[in-house]
Amino acid sequence: MTKYIEINSKTACNRINSNFLPFNWDLNIYRGCEHKCQYCFALYSHKYINSTEFFDEIYVKKNIVECFEKQISSRRWKQTTVNIGGVTDSYQPAEKEYKLMPEILKLCIKYKVPISLSTKSKLILRDFDLFAELATLVPVDIACTITTLNENVRKLIEPNGATSQERFNNLKEFSKTNVNTGIFIMPIIPELTDSYDNLNMLYKTAKENNVNYAVTTILNLRGETKISFLKFVKDKLPHLYNKITSHYKGNYVNSTYKKQLDKILYKISNKYPLMEKTKIYPDYKDIDTQLTLF
Ligand code: SF4
């Protein structure tokens, strides 16, 4: 049973010092995430609050709206993109109850703050009008993480997220506005979501839904994520355990596998012509990440 724990935060946006991400500020309303993805990269974050229940103990930053206004109304604040939910999903089920995102978006409109956000939830459509209004004032980027169109696999690896079709529907709706839309095909899981057919279908469906760009990343296995993901494979997909692990050298896939996958991605991304010359994420330098602009 999921427990919501209300907390007060000192600041809303945290500074990110990264030379490959296209933003310097990240805002997370929730700590922990109910979507329960088996490959969750954010599991590590709960250890800072001495909890091991990342999926079931959700910490809600009740005062985040006040903190956000304090930060962005300051004379020292430079108008820059805020990434919303870089660690945990801002539209996870708790948001249905707490309704903090509409207030954050109203402040973004008031202070003209450009944003980027990614989600696996269809709850984002509740705030459609606010995003659409904000996108008439400043750049707004919305991405959905979509890893497979096979619902059986999706349910297994992202049990509490929206269906992949619903996530494409989010993007289709936002493509009718000024919002820049993207698909995060990440992580690509060896032997499970890395087939030509799956990746081709994702790109094809993205194109059909007027998505502007795609970002791909292969699954890395580090820290808590490695332990938890490999346990999941052992329990639920034992026949794939040896095959999946054979592609890894340490925390990353080996170079032979990476080269093969890069070739497939190159071929597929070239099949889908550029639809719009967006300049989003121009500085992506992460060698594990590939960006395709449709
Ligand atoms: S949506 Fe993101 S943060 Fe939430 S469980 Fe999935 S990977 Fe983790």
Image (cartoon, rainbow, N blue to C red):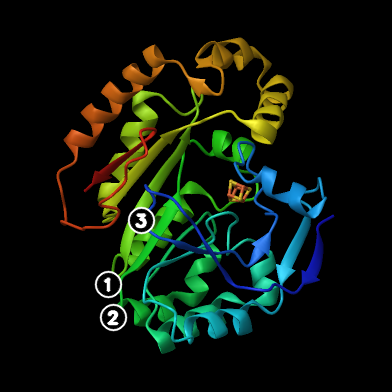
**Residue 56 at x, y percent in the picture:** 79, 53
What is the three-letter code of the residue carrying label 1? Answer: Asn
In the rendered image, which residue does mark 2 sit on?
136
Residue positioned 48% across, 47% down in the render: 164
Q: Secondary structure at mark 2?
A: loop
Please say if the residues under marks 3 and 2 sit with CB atoms less than 8 Å apart. Answer: no
Quadrant assignment, res 157: top right
Task: Name the amino acid type tagged 3.
Answer: Pro
Q: Is residue 117 above or below residue 67?
A: above
> Which residue position holds label 3?
22
Q: Earlier in the sequence, mark 3 or mark 2?
A: 3
Towards the viewer: 78 or 131: 78
Residue occupied by mark 1: 178
Tell me the mark number nearer the camera, choosing from 1 and 3.
3
Residue 23 in which image quadrant: bottom left
Q: Which quarter of the rendered picture does the N terminus lie within?
A: bottom right
Q: Are marks 1 and 2 in contact (CB under 8 Å)?
A: yes
Residue at image location 69% in from the left, 79% down from the top: 63
